[in-house]
Image (cartoon, helix red, strand yellow):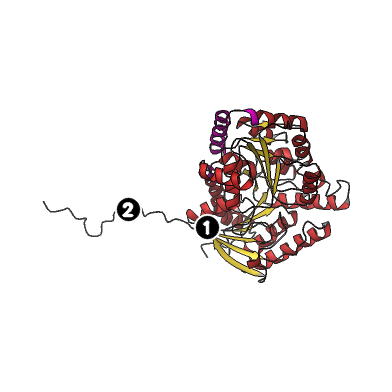
Amino acid sequence: MAPVLPRPGASERVQPEQPVRPGRLLCVYQHAPTPDAPGIYRHRRYFAELVQRGWQVDLVSTPRNYMTGEVPRAYRKPAFRSETIEGIAHHWVWTPGGIHRSRAARVANYAGFGSAAAARAVTLPRPDVLLVSSPPLPVAGLGPLLARRFGCPWLLEVRDIWPESAASVGWLSSESTAYRMLERFAHSVTRRARTVIVPTPGLEPLVRAHGAREVCVLPGIVRARPPDPQRRTRTRASLGISEDSCVFLYLGAIGVANGLDLLLEAVDSLPDDLPAHVVVAGDGSARRSFAEAVTARRLDRITLLAPVEQEGVADLLAAADVGLHLLRPDPVFGSALPTKALEYLGAGLPFVTTVPGLPSDVAAASGGAAVSSAAELTGEFVWWSRATSDERRARGRQALRYGLDNFGLETNANRLERLLERTRDEQPQRQRAADPHPVDPHL
């Protein structure tokens, strides 16, 4: 039987496939680490996932590492350098050094980045959405400026609330003129942003108090790291730590806000026969004084390492049994969950925190603990060191399950992409609504 052909002129109502609308995101974020640099970088995981979904992502940053204050040798000569990392177009700009030397040097660094980032950003293709990440707070001012230049909507990310955080660590007085000026500036840019992105729910009421109209929570990402017995044994051997020791790992900044004096007191009080060892890896303004205190007190249980690259981070996580999250007790810190805590969860490490609020809640729910004194921290060291390996592994599995259930990549990347698409697609409507003299389409 011959096939039935459509009558001449007959039209078939075939729905065309909806084309995928590519999007372009421009992010300005001062301290994105260079490849293999020390530090853990949540943004790269989000942006690499967006690239996999068809987005084009430009990132303007400085190669100067925040913890060390140094610039890798390969990045020292050109004022501007571009490269592609995991599909993300990184655009590096030069900034003044000495960020941990003095307040004046830090202010110069912030101002230098703001100027250089603006100069580099305006040479890039027009984005559909602009994302500006703070702190440092002055970078937030690039949001409205670049958005006006490109005629695009912009989003503000607040990873740490300023100037409140600066006052909490003694960097600024809340009674000073500088504090009041920064406070007015923070409120101004927050009110103007289309949406404010925060990494933890605890920051939402704080940015709303700054005037945020809409808030989106995009936490750090937990990436599962399967146990690696060979790496564990090799790393412990290189550090001179026995297999039967319980290893506590502190990973990250060593600054005035971290309160590592509590760690010194706790370790100083441990019984001599306890199989416990503490590894501290990082850098910051208080590293020298911490190292001197370790030597003066003869705390052989503490191994202090320089900041480590990503492979080194994996080695230390594999070798450890428990993570440490130490900060001075301050309400500002209670609203945030640093990326290093999520790294602990991804490696199956319960963690002990000194911070009430969100960190304490997450630590307890994932198999760890919260402490408020050196004596309590000593007690945790004793408990974990005397626990059986089976007990520690069970707590580790609990930590990993909790991390993946609450901080998995796909769920949170979906939330980010929906926000970007909605922001991009609403822009023409807002432009028409703002035009007092629209053009009549019938003319």
In this rendered view, identify the residue nearer to me: 295 or 201.
295
Disc 2 to disc 1: CB gap under 8 Å: no
Amino acid at dot 1: Glu
Question: Is there any visible trace of residue 364 in the rendered image?
Answer: yes
Determine which of the numbered discs, if any, sits on residue 413 in the image.
none
Q: Residue at x 77, y 32 (%)?
A: 269
Observer-side mark, 2 or 1, equals 1
Viewer-proximal residue among 102 and 80: 102
- Identify the residue at horizontal 17%, vertical 53% (top origin): 4
The reply to whether the magenta stretch includes residue 401 is: yes
Residue sitting nearer the eye, 338 or 386: 386
Residue 140, given in percent of the width and then of the height, sits at 71, 55
Tag 1: Cα neighbours inside 10 Å, few (<14), some, or many (≥20)?
some
Q: Amino acid at mark 2?
A: Val
Residue labelled with disc 1: 86
Kindly indicate the quadrant of the structure image that contains residue 431.
Answer: bottom right
Which residues are the magenta region? 384-412
Image position, residue 263 (x, y; %) = 75, 38
Say which label, 2 or 1, has the lower sequence index: 2
Above or below: residue 87 compared with residue 386? below
SS at circle 2: loop
When the figure is inspected, residue 338 is found, relative to residue 178, above or below; the finding is above
With respect to residue 268, does 286 lie above or below? below
- Where residue 14 is drawn, which disc sits there? 2
